[in-house]
């Protein structure tokens, strides 16, 4: 399952139904809003993408995008519009849109664009989160990112390559939450067939090896994992 959460915003119910059905068939979690006003109430920090109709009654898609960007919400946006002019495209991109699809659209094209944008966004998030330091420490836990070593209270623990890659990824993106799909795509890539459960199994093993520091890896049920930079606050 992809597990990334997408918000579809369109005042045409048929369009929403078509997109929701096909995106869910691909494994995405899909929420629907039939107006920009409803979308503002539904959007969360868990959504990884918005598919947004431009021409809607009330607040337009362009206005919604402008509101989101002014509030420093930079969730990727794919605009949908019946207009396919250069001016509309330029307006969409100037307002912080990431892609632009004209109606009537090919469902296959939408799915390809969605997959490509989510992958590109993940790579950007990870690369921009690269730390200056090569060590991450909390009390007796030390993660040597350059040396691929983890020590607990002065003792090096034995972890697998995949376990270290997960821990390193969470460290570099902390305190941002990563979905299981994002962890799978980053650590295993698209060439290996693995399930969401694979991430859970590896993290369970990793937590056991971290001992008293297991609580730094936090699970938000139904969403994903993040590395807590203030573990003392967790149960």
Image (cartoon, rainbow, N blue to C red):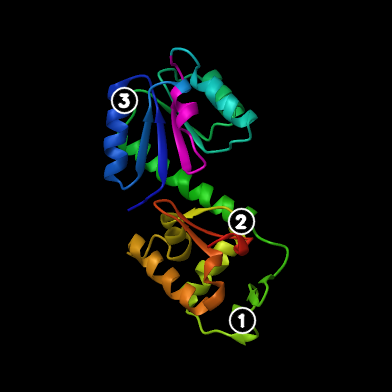
Judging from the image, what secondary structure is the residue with disc 3 in?
Answer: helix
| Proximity of marks 2 and 1: CB atoms separated by less than 8 Å | no
Which image quadrant for residue 184?
Answer: bottom left
Q: Earlier along the polypeptide chain: callout 2 or callout 3?
A: 3
Inspect this view and state whether residue 87 appears. yes
Residue in view at x 53 percent, y 21 percent: 62
Residue behind mark 2: 127
Distance, label 1 to label 3, CA atoms, is 53 Å
> Is 146 located above or below residue 57 in the figure?
below
- Residue 15 is marked as 3
Q: Position of residue 216 (x, y in %)?
A: 56, 66
Residue behind mark 1: 151
Dot 2 alpha-carbon crowd within 10 angstroms: few under 14, some 14 to 19, many 20 or more:
few
Residue in view at x 65 percent, y 85 percent: 154
> Is 166 located above or below residue 158 in the figure?
above
Dot 1 alpha-carbon crowd within 10 angstroms: few under 14, some 14 to 19, many 20 or more:
some
Judging from the image, what secondary structure is the residue with disc 1 in?
Answer: strand
- Closer mark to the observer between disc 1 and disc 3: 1
Distance, label 2 to label 3, CA atoms, is 35 Å
State the extent of the magenta-drawn residues as a range.
Answer: 38-56
């Amino acid at each position: 399952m992809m597990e990334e959460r997408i918000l579809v915003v369109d005042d045409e119910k048929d369009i929403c139904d078509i997109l929701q059905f096909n995106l869910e068939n691909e494994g995405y979690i899909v929420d629907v809003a039939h107006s920009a006003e409803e979308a503002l109430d539904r959007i969360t920090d868990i959504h990884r993408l918005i598919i947004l109709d431009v021409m809607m009654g009330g607040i337009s898609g362009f206005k919604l995008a402008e509101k989101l960007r002014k509030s420093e919400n930079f969730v990727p946006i794919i605009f949908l519009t019946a207009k396919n002019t250069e001016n509309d495209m330029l307006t969409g991109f100037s307002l912080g849109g990431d892609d632009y699809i004209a109606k009537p659209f090919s469902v296959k094209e939408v799915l390809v664009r969605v997959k490509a944008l989510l992958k590109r966004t993940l790579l950007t998030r990870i690369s921009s989160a690269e730390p200056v330091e090569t060590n991450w420490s909390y009390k007796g836990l030390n993660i040597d990112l350059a040396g691929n070593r983890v020590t607990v209270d002065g003792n090096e623990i034995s972890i697998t390559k995949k376990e270290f890659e997960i821990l390193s990824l969470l460290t570099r993106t902390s305190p941002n939450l990563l979905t299981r799909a994002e962890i799978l795509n980053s650590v295993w890539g698209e060439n290996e067939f693995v399930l969401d459960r694979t991430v859970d199994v590896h993290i369970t093993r990793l937590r056991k090896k971290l001992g008293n520091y297991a609580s730094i890896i936090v699970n938000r049920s139904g969403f994903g994992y993040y590395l807590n930079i203030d573990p003392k606050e967790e149960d």
